């Protein structure tokens, strides 16, 4: 029996305890389960389930705010000690702290990757338009000449990927027939972000020079 199968069977046999939101379990609940369902759950599988169950955030929150423990019939089976409530609170606080640390690290890594990508895009744009020698260009940009080709190749690949992404996004938007707000909601994007991407995917055509306006043309001499 797997842990998932164990959870499903416990929910079926003891719905008052395992059928809804987690409740603080009676102490030594494993013994009660074995007595009520002999030869059904192996000790190893049941221990694994209870370990996972009691370490979940939902269970820890139930313990941190609860007043009683509950038996297999969902009935109160002893008061919940303040010590156990504090242990649950500390465990939740430590998890939140680790979560916040990971989130901050991920945000820093994304910001760094975004900055590096922008640098490569600017490097490629400037390299394609420069009249400097390769050596002087590297000195100006502070780039190691041996790494220039690698960075330019990466920038070209990233530019192609972005152009493909923008083209597919614009095509999907036009085919959807939705408004910007509705399409953004469908794609789980902010409407302002979507509008910016669509504008980037479909830039306005360059303005044509229609020549001087009539008011700008030289006028003839006025009649006397």
Image (cartoon, rainbow, N blue to C red):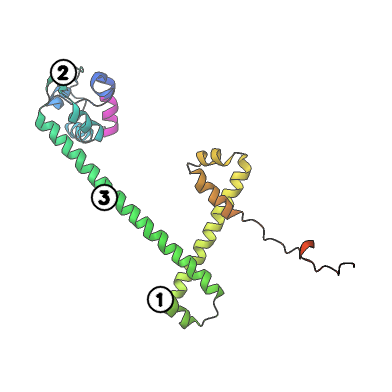
Mark 3 → mark 2, Cα distance in angstroms: 38 Å
Q: Position of residue 163 (x, y in %)?
A: 56, 58
Residue 58 seen from this side: yes
Lower position in the chain sequence, tag 3 or tag 1: 3
**Which of the 4 image quarters holds residue 23?**
top left
Q: Looking at the image, do the residues carrying marks 3 and 1 touch, with CB atoms under 8 Å apart? A: no
Q: Position of residue 195 (x, y in %)?
A: 55, 48
Task: Name the residue tied to disc 3.
Answer: 101
Q: Looking at the image, do the residues carrying marks 1 and 2 touch, with CB atoms under 8 Å apart? A: no
Q: Position of residue 34 (x, y in %)?
A: 16, 24
Describe the element under mark 2 as helix, strand or loop. Answer: strand
Given this view, does label 1 or label 2 mark the residue nearer the observer?
Answer: 1
Q: Is residue 131 magenta?
A: no
What's the mark number on residue 142?
1
Q: Which region shows up in magenta? A: 1-10
What's the mark number on residue 8?
none
- 28 up-or-down from 161: above or below: above
Who is closer to the viewer here, 44 or 221?
221
Given this view, does label 3 or label 2 mark the residue nearer the observer?
Answer: 3
Describe the element under mark 3 as helix, strand or loop. Answer: helix
């Amino acid at each position: 029996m797997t842990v998932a199968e164990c959870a499903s069977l416990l929910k079926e046999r003891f719905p008052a305890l395992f059928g809804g939101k987690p409740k603080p379990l009676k102490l030594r609940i494993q013994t009660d389960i074995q007595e009520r369902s002999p030869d059904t759950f192996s000790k190893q599988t049941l221990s694994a389930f209870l370990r996972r169950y009691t370490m979940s955030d939902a269970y820890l929150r139930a313990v941190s705010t609860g007043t009683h423990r509950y038996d297999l019939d969902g009935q109160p089976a002893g008061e919940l000690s303040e010590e156990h409530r504090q242990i649950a609170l500390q465990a939740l606080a430590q998890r939140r702290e680790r979560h916040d640390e990971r989130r901050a690290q991920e945000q820093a890594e994304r910001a760094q990757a975004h900055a590096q990508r922008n640098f490569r895009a600017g490097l490629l744009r400037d390299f394609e338009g420069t009249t400097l020698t390769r050596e002087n260009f590297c000195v100006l940009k502070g780039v190691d000449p041996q790494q220039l080709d690698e960075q330019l190749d990466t920038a070209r690949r990233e530019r192609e990927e972005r152009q493909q992404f923008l083209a597919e996004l614009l095509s999907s938007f036009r085919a959807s027939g939705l408004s910007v707000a509705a399409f953004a909601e469908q794609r789980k994007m902010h409407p302002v972000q979507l509008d910016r991407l669509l504008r980037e995917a479909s830039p306005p055509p360059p303005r044509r020079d229609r020549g001087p306006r009539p008011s700008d043309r030289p006028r003839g001499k006025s009649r006397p």
